[in-house]
Image (spheres, grey):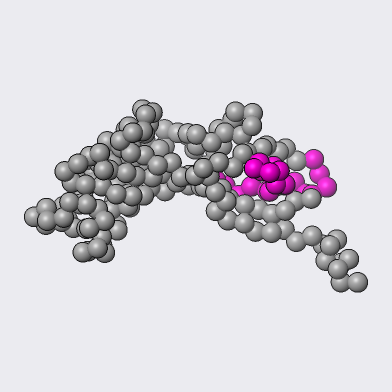
Amino acid sequence: MFRGKIKLVYKQEIDQKSESGFEKAIFQASYHEFLLKSQAYNPGHRFKTFSRMKEVDGKANSLHYKLSFSVLHLIEKLNNKMPFIRDNLGNKLSFETPRFELIESHIEDISLHKVAVYYETEPFTLVEFMGEYLLLSNSGKAENELAETFVVRMQPNLSILYYQGITQPQIRSIAGH
């Protein structure tokens, strides 16, 4: 019995403590771009942090978008595979859409720079909840057909982004009587 359609999202936070080469490249590229692009919202370098720039000039929120161009080529190298989320067989989960976010930064202290990359999956069919595990399928098979499935454990920074329940005609007809 299928429960619904879902999309998952994984949030990868990246800061100075991040260790992988991918994370270090994202960190460096986005910080250098922040220093360059933030000048438009910080004439005379009056403000030191991204959060202060946003308080004074709401247009500074566009830095999320503007900085994303400095890291998109790095994200493309992932070939639409999430760096840390795997199914129970060890296969990396695929993502459909990445999104970049500047969490905080400081124009004089790189150690305060923090960003996130969100990886949004394509829609999956949620077959069953099994404690902290999700039994999922990405095939478009009908409920009475054999469908290829995989299991993913819910973990920190992984969330169900969208859910759409699947109505069960047999339940509706029974309830109507």
Q: Residue at x 55, y 53 (%)?
A: 161
The residue furthest bottom is 177
Relative image position of residue 67 (x, y in whole percent): 29, 47
Quarter of the picture holding the C terminus? bottom right
Residue 114 forms part of the magenta stretch: no
Q: Which of 155 and 24 is in front in this view?
A: 155
Task: Judge from the rendering whether residue 154 lies leftward or rightward of residue 65; answer left or right.
Answer: right
The residue furthest right is 177
Q: Looking at the image, can residue 147 be seen?
A: yes
Task: Judge from the rendering whether residue 108 lies leftward or rightward of residue 122; answer left or right.
Answer: left
Q: Which residue is drawn at 85% across and 61% down?
A: 170
Relative image position of residue 11 (x, y in whole percent): 46, 45
How many marks on residues? 0
Q: Give the range drawn in magenta.
A: 121-146
- Residue 28: image quadrant is top left
Relative image position of residue 157 (x, y in whole percent): 49, 44
Relative image position of residue 50 (x, y in whole percent): 24, 53
Task: Judge from the rendering whether residue 40 lies leftward or rightward of residue 128; answer left or right.
Answer: left
- Residue 165: image quadrant is bottom right
Q: Looking at the image, can residue 136 be seen?
A: no
Q: Nearer the viewer, residue 138 or 117?
A: 117
- Residue 91: image quadrant is top right
